[in-house]
Image (cartoon, rainbow, N blue to C red):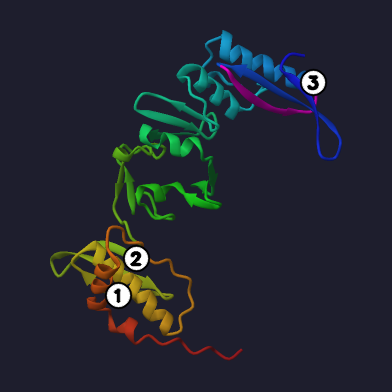
């Protein structure tokens, strides 16, 4: 059958691979248990690429092709560029299809980043594999991994699938930092969970509060606290400037003098 090739698994069992060539590109369609299933996948790919002008929204669960491959082929047909991830590009943005009903939107500037990285969803969080690590996609926009939508950042058009830069507004950029009114003035409060929240101090800038949080981590570790804190990464500061700010920041006496609670006898 055209586009179908017999292959063997490591254990010696036979299976069938389907592939198609379009615009001089050889495209693998996957492996199948039977020759007829592989042929059905080839025929559908041929129909998508060369015959019917089918759209992504016309996909059905009965398709012999997986949904991800369906999106990839339609994008290649319409836009002339092949991506290995389920992306459909438009002029100024693109869609990333997690499923037929779960679709994300990104700026076209992010196209080649996500074209080479598969987005995974777990417990409502979106991750990509980057250099062997799972990285929350929020990090790409300067948002902390487990930041809370509506509290730490906003989707300005209320669409939580729209990750275009113009639609994201960061409220709290740093761990343990929040903008507050302190003695009638706008300040940035830094606080830390030891356990139980301790206020580290109130500061004139968000950066100062973020560095104060880092300084509190260092102090608490010296005081014997073994909690695994994540320090704030401060972009745009040289080591010398960071060190100067760090050394001059005042930290609450409750942090400076913190003592571990006595362990109760069993």
Q: Decide if residue 264 is on the left or right side of residue 1.
A: left
Q: State how far apart marks 1 and 3 are (Cα).
A: 67 Å
Q: Decide if residue 55 is on the left or right side of residue 149.
A: right
Residue that protrudes farthest toward the top in the picture? 51
The residue wearing badge 1 is: 200
The residue wearing badge 3 is: 35
Q: Which residues are magenta?
A: 24-35
Image location of residue 50, percent across then percent down? 57, 10
* Residues at marks 1 and 3 touching, judged by CB atoms closer than 8 Å: no
| 210, above or below 97, in the image | below
As for residue 217 lying within the magenta part, the answer is: no
At a point 65% along the width and 16% down the height, the residue shown is 44
Residue that protrudes farthest toward the left in the picture? 184
| 175, above or below 70, in the image | below
The residue wearing badge 2 is: 176
User: Dot 3: what SS?
Assistant: helix
């Amino acid at each position: 059958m055209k586009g179908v090739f017999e292959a063997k698994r490591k254990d010696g069992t036979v299976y069938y691979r389907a592939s198609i060539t379009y615009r001089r590109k050889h495209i693998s369609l996957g492996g199948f248990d039977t020759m007829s299933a592989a042929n059905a996948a080839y025929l559908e790919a041929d129909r998508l690429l060369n015959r019917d002008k089918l759209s992504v929204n016309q996909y059905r669960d009965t398709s012999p092709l997986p949904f991800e491959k369906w999106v990839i082929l339609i994008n290649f047909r319409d836009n002339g560029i092949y991506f290995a991830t389920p992306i459909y590009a438009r002029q100024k943005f693109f869609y990333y299809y997690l499923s037929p009903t779960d679709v994300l939107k990104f700026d076209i500037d992010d196209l080649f980043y996500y074209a080479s990285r598969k987005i995974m969803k777990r417990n409502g969080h979106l991750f990509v594999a980057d250099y062997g690590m799972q990285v929350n996609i929020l990090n790409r926009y300067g948002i902390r991994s487990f930041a809370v939508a509506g509290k730490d950042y906003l989707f300005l058009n209320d669409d939580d699938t729209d990750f275009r830069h113009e639609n994201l507004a960061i409220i709290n950029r740093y761990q343990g930092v929040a903008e507050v009114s302190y003695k009638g003035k706008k300040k940035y409060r830094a606080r830390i969970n030891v356990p139980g929240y301790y206020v580290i101090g109130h500061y004139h800038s968000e950066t100062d509060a973020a560095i104060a949080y880092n300084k509190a981590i260092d102090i608490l570790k010296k005081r014997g606290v073994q909690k695994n804190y994540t320090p704030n990464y401060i972009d745009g500061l040289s080591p010398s400037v960071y060190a100067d700010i760090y050394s001059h920041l005042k930290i609450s006496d409750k942090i400076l003098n913190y003592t571990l609670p006595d362990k109760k006898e069993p």
